[in-house]
Amino acid sequence: FPVEIGKQTLVLGIGRDITERKRAEEALRESEERLKILFEFAPDAYYLNDLQGKFVDGNKAAEEITGYTREELIGKNMLELKLLPPEQIAKAAAALARHAHGKHAGPNEFALNRKDGSQVPVEIRAFPVEIKGQTLVLGIARDISERKRAEEEMRESEERYRNLFDSTHDMVQSVAPDGRLVFVNQVWLETLGYTEADLPSLNLFDIIHPESLSHCQELFSRVMAGESLDHVEATFVAKDGRPTVVEGHVTPRLAGGGVVATHGFFRDITERKRAEEERK
């Protein structure tokens, strides 16, 4: 701005070093670019929607899994696009209600209706996020077709062999990667005193004696990595609290290119171990 100094009119300028600010702006821009690339090329379907369920953005995987282009998705919600079957809409609405209260939802399984009329099973996790002062929902949808196919193959296989397993004198169990007991035979139930009704609430590690727990967890990890184990000895806990010593072998159940369960075949050796102790 002009200033008078004596008989001269001069222009006074004020400069400020903004090197740090420009450096910070450039770092922010680079960070946003990296995040944009991660979002766009993530292998799972990433999408953003508002609290009314309207899509705000989506990545390439979201386009592939739904069959819709990003332009077709943005501004519409799942109901308009009929992405979910009617019986699953209530579950989706419950998830949105959680987001409105700042809570995450999932993992939840849905059957996604694609644009071409086909269905794909997906597992969705969703998290409320704040972007430019607006609360949005970041959803991550994973195609679980292969996993569901492997589970179905395993179920059919277990059904085929159920009669065979029930006729054996050994305890037979099949365990999922998370420790759920997928199948046990009648001898297993009778030996440990459980019923079929008990199974949904049982985990493998619930029925292992504390003294065997760390050993069995290590063996389970090895089998899930593809190893077959012979001469396995462990102590189970019966429903009434009795320790039951067993020995046998455990093998991995392969499907879809990976290990989907473990198969264990055991024999109750409690009496034999007791007799050995008495002879000492």
Image (spheres, grey):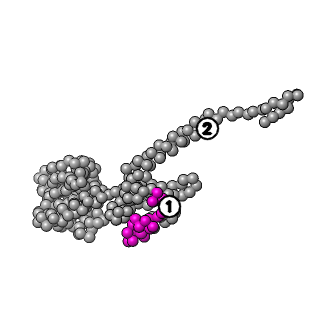
Residue plotted at (88% across, 28% down) = 7
* Residue 33 shows in the view: yes
Q: At numbered mark 1, what does the secondary structure look like: helix, strand or loop?
A: loop
Magenta stretch bounds: 71-92
Residue plotted at (22% across, 48% down) = 226
Residue in the foreground of this view, choosing between 93 and 83: 83
> What residue is disc 2 on?
21
What type is the residue that disc 1 sits on? Gly
Asked whether 79 falls inside the magenta stretch, the response is yes
Disc 1 crowd rating (10 Å Cα; few below 14, some 14-19, many 20+) is some
What type is the residue that disc 2 sits on? Arg
The percent coordinates of residue 37 (x first, y second) are: 45, 45
Q: Quadrant of residue 78?
A: bottom left
Ranked by sequence position, the earlier of labels 1 and 2 is 2
Q: CA–CA distance between discs 1 and 2?
A: 36 Å
Asked whether 31 falls inside the magenta stretch, the response is no
Mark linked to residue 75: 1
| 7 relative to 129 in the view: left or right | right
Q: Quadrant of residue 90?
A: bottom left
Residue plotted at (12% across, 53% down) = 276
The percent coordinates of residue 170 (x first, y second) are: 13, 61
| 221 relative to 105 in the view: left or right | left
